[in-house]
């Protein structure tokens, strides 16, 4: 019986479907065609059957392994979802599922967001020398030692550069790549090992399309090492005739995002399929040498080798986190969890015992939300995993606008941050059971390069290397768009002091947390400070994990205070404490290789849980952005969609406010649960402290804006101080009183600066044209100058140069463009005096100050 007859018989018996039979026939035909030239028809048919049978057996084993992994993960998640209890002691299946995606404490579990941060950070700690060598300069943002990157690439790809430093960094990168590959496979993946060195090669679809198929093939063909490249259908070495076909297929795959290799199904399935089966496609093309890799990367890749390296590392870490948290097919697991939530909600509606936290909700109100619940879960999950892009051009266009506005409007946020951050930090230390007196001293010390290196080596990632994937920048939201606009936004945040201050505060908190743990290693878990114990338990750290952590030798740099670093916890598998650690973990395998693997996995997981505590609590101390808060507004809107970009633009500068509000409300609820008095004291002291900090920030901003300090006996001062310190006004000069003076409506303010900028542009162009047609005075010159004063990147924003830019350049330009400039300047002074009883120490229109600020107010 021929192979085709066997398939037809199997379909008739219902053993396989028609689609499965067609796929098997296609694979058989491919194998047959490859073997036919050498073996003839009969021999080729037999060889094709043997090869296909071997492949199917291997694929069947891999499928069974993935099913077992998926089942084990779902059993674990089902146990957590069923056992989770809210503050009232009742079940809350919806809250439990959200905790599994993102958790900032009090939930008793690791989360997807926290796990992926921990994996990325621990890996970056292993590459501390790379991060230090290629860090960005403080002023221009250019990377140090950039020429050495080519040497690192050469050493990584087996072309010795002869430079020991480059070789050491290349070896460290290759070691991290291999560790991530093995871990990806252990979680259900199937990525083969590439001998002779490996660096990921990403392809820019636009560059390929601009060059065209023939030019691209002509460029890449002489650079490829066809001896190492295997036919994707047969696994054999590529023939010359097959190379051209494979390059055509590769071009189509890259330029169509994989759709050229898919078929329209009667029962479509979204996405790219099981995550475990991805991440092998870009490993197919092999270059002859490092020069070929560099040449291609410059023309058709990322351009920056460092970007390619860390994009691969960060992306692999994210995928590993998703597979370890939700199984080889995380999307399917999340879909299953969504159904559990809906089923439990339906039980509540029917009056049956349920895990849904109905509280005082009526059956009708629960029914009304039964479709919202999975939508909300999807929104948080997609935000953590990375929202899809439906139009790259639209996403880049809106991203450029947001970056320009960030550069133009956010240059003074560092003033308010400097005044209010210590109080937010102190509240987090209180909630974490940490001493609060070291924060200011530690902040000053952390600006030194030595302490920065110490923090990075301990596993506290540098934001610069996270932003390679477009992660959150403080206050500004996601940094995306063209390179030039990202450079403007990032330089403004750096030159204003906001970025280095934010990074320093993160390092301070993280190092202080590690020092506090080192000081308490003599205590058993139950003897810990209740708040510290609660903080650890909030992320799933139990007695066993604590005993492993406190068995870690403290790291004491330069004879200073000791730290228990997550990277040292992960290294316990190779240290003298190994027997004790294996005893704590209950590992008693007689097979040394198995015991070593189990120990390494166990201590690595505890190290990442420990690091997750540090990183997520750091978000409390230095709020940046949370997936729950932003996804509440963004929902499931993809990047590049019109409404998705409109919502993102509306959220510009609101990341801090959303994160701060969400996390503080959660903390207040926890304190209220302890006692009403404790909750009221926490909320009241926080409001008072932030109001004082906001007041100091307001007065500093008044002075740097050329004004005398505002009288502090004016109730309006304290209202503005409350707004500023409480987060609403922690956005530079945009969100509070000055907005009304810039003729910004409340609607424009709420909609965000993008809408406000569009409104200003319309007034300047269309509005003035309409006034001109009506025969009215347009004041176009004055409005044009004001637009330059508000929206000029960098110059109009940086707090230490904004007033000089306004007085020396723009005011003088206004004299030329506005016949009533002098009158307008005097009106500004009169309005300031009448509204807030202030005066200008650097008067509008003057090129130099007339006096010093009157500080006694």
Image: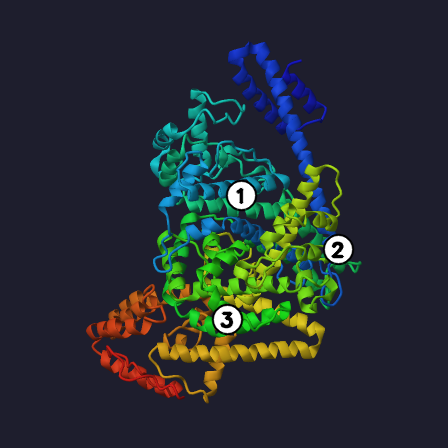
Q: Nearer the viewer, residue 554 or 94?
A: 554
User: Which residue is located at x 67 percent, y 18 percent?
Assistant: 6
Q: Nearer the viewer, residue 566 or 647?
A: 566
Left or right, 7 with reference to 348: left
User: Which residue is located at x 67 percent, y 77 percent?
Assistant: 678
Say which element carries label 2. helix
> Which mark lies nearer to you, 3 or 2?
3
Cα separation, mark 3 vs mark 1, equals 35 Å
- Which residue is disc 2 drawn over? 82
- Which residue is disc 3 drawn over? 441
Give the mark nearest the N terminus, 3 or 2.
2
Give the mark nearest the N terminus, 3 or 1.
1
Binning the other alpha carbons within 10 Å of mark 1 as few (below 14), some (14 to 19) or many (20 upward) gives some
Q: Position of residue 531 (x, y in %)?
A: 67, 68
Q: Position of residue 551 (x, y in %)?
A: 68, 55
- Which residue is disc 1 drawn over? 176
In this view, which residue lies farthest toward the right? 352
Say which element carries label 1. helix
The C terminus is located in which quarter? bottom left
Left or right, 778 with reference to 341: left
> Which mark lies nearer to you, 3 or 1?
3
Give the mark nearest the N terminus, 1 or 2.
2
Image colouring: rainbow
């Amino acid at each position: 019986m021929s192979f085709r007859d066997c398939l037809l018989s199997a379909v008739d018996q219902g053993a396989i479907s028609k689609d499965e039979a067609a796929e098997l026939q296609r694979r058989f035909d491919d194998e047959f065609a490859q073997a036919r030239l050498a073996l003839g028809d009969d021999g080729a048919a037999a060889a094709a059957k043997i090869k296909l049978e071997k492949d199917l057996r291997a694929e069947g084993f891999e499928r069974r392994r993935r099913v077992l992994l998926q089942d084990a993960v779902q059993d674990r998640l089902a146990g957590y979802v069923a056992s989770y209890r809210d503050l009232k002691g009742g079940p809350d299946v919806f809250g439990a599922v959200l905790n599994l995606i993102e958790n900032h404490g009090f939930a008793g579990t690791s989360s997807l967001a926290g796990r992926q941060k921990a994996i990325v950070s621990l890996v970056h700690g292993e590459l501390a020398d790379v991060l230090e060598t290629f860090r960005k300069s403080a002023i221009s943002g250019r990377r140090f030692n950039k020429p050495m990157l080519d040497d690192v690439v050469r050493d990584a790809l087996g072309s010795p550069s002869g430079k020991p430093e480059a070789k050491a960094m290349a070896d460290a990168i290759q070691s991290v790549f291999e560790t991530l590959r093995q871990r990806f496979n252990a979680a259900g993946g199937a990525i083969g090992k590439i001998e002779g060195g490996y660096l990921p090669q990403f392809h820019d679809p636009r560059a390929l399309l601009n060059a065209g198929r023939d030019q691209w093939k002509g460029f890449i063909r002489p650079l490829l090492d066809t001896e190492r490249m295997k036919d994707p259908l047969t696994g054999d070495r590529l023939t010359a005739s097959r190379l051209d076909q494979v390059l055509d297929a590769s071009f189509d795959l890259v330029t169509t995002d994989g759709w050229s290799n898919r078929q329209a199904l009667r029962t479509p399935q979204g996405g790219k399929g099981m995550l475990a089966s991805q991440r092998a496609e870009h490993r197919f093309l092999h270059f002859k040498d490092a020069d070929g890799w560099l040449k291609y990367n410059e023309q058709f890749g990322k351009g920056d080798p460092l970007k390619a390296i860390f994009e691969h590392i960060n992306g692999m870490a994210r995928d590993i986190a998703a597979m370890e948290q939700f199984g080889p097919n995380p999307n399917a697991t999340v879909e299953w969890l969504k159904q559990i939530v809906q089923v439990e909600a339906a039980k509540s509606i029917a009056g049956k015992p349920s895990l849904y936290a109905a509280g005082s909700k009526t059956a009708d109100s629960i029914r009304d939300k039964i479709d919202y619940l999975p939508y909300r879960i999807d929104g948080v999950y997609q935000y953590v995993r990375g929202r899809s892009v439906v139009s790259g051009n639209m996403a880049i266009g809106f991203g450029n606008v947001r970056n320009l506005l960030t550069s133009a409007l956010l240059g003074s946020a560092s003033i308010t941050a400097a005044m209010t951050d210590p109080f937010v930090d102190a509240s987090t230390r209180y909630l974490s059971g940490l001493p609060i007196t070291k924060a200011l001293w530690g902040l000053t010390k952390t600006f030194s390069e030595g302490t920065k290196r110490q923090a990075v080596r301990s596993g506290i990632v540098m934001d610069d290397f996270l932003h390679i994937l477009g992660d959150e920048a403080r206050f500004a939201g996601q940094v995306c768009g063209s390179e030039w606009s990202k450079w403007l936004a990032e330089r403004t945040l750096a030159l204003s002091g906001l970025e280095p201050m934010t990074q320093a505060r993160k390092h301070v908190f993280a190092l202080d947390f590690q020092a506090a743990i080192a000081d308490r290693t003599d205590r058993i878990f139950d003897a810990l400070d209740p708040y510290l114990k609660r903080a650890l338990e909030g992320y799933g750290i139990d007695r066993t994990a604590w005993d492993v952590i406190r068995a870690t030798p403290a790291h004491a740099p330069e004879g200073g205070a000791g730290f228990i670093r997550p990277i040292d916890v992960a290294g316990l598998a190779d240290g003298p404490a190994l027997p004790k650690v294996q005893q704590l973990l209950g590992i008693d395998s007689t097979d040394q290789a198995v015991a070593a693997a189990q120990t390494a996995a166990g201590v690595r997981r505890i190290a990442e849980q420990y690091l997750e505590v540090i990183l997520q609590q750091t978000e409390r101390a230095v709020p940046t952005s949370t997936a729950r808060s932003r996804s509440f507004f963004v929902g499931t809107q993809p990047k590049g969609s019109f409404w998705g970009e409109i919502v993102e633009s509306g959220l510009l500068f609101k990341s801090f406010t959303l994160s701060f509000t969400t996390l503080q409300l959660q903390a207040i609820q926890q304190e209220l649960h302890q006692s009403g008095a404790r909750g009221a004291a926490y909320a009241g002291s926080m409001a008072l402290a932030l109001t004082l900090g906001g007041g100091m920030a307001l007065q500093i901003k008044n002075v740097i804006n050329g004004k005398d300090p505002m009288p502090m006996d004016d109730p309006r001062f304290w209202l503005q101080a409350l707004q500023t310190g409480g987060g609403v006004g922690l956005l530079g000069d945009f969100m509070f009183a000055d907005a009304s003076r810039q003729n910004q409506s409340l609607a424009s303010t709420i909609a965000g600066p993008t809408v406000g900028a569009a409104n200003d542009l319309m007034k300047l162009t269309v509005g003035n044209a309409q006034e001109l047609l009506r025969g009215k005075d347009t004041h176009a010159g004055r409005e044009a100058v004001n637009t330059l004063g508000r929206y000029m990147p960098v110059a109009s924003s940086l707090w230490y140069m904004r007033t000089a830019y306004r007085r020396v350049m723009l005011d003088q330009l206004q004299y030329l463009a506005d016949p009533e400039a002098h009158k307008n300047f005097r009106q500004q002074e009169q309005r300031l005096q009448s509204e807030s009883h202030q005066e200008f120490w650097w008067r509008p229109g003057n090129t130099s100050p007339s006096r010093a600020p009157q500080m006694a107010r």
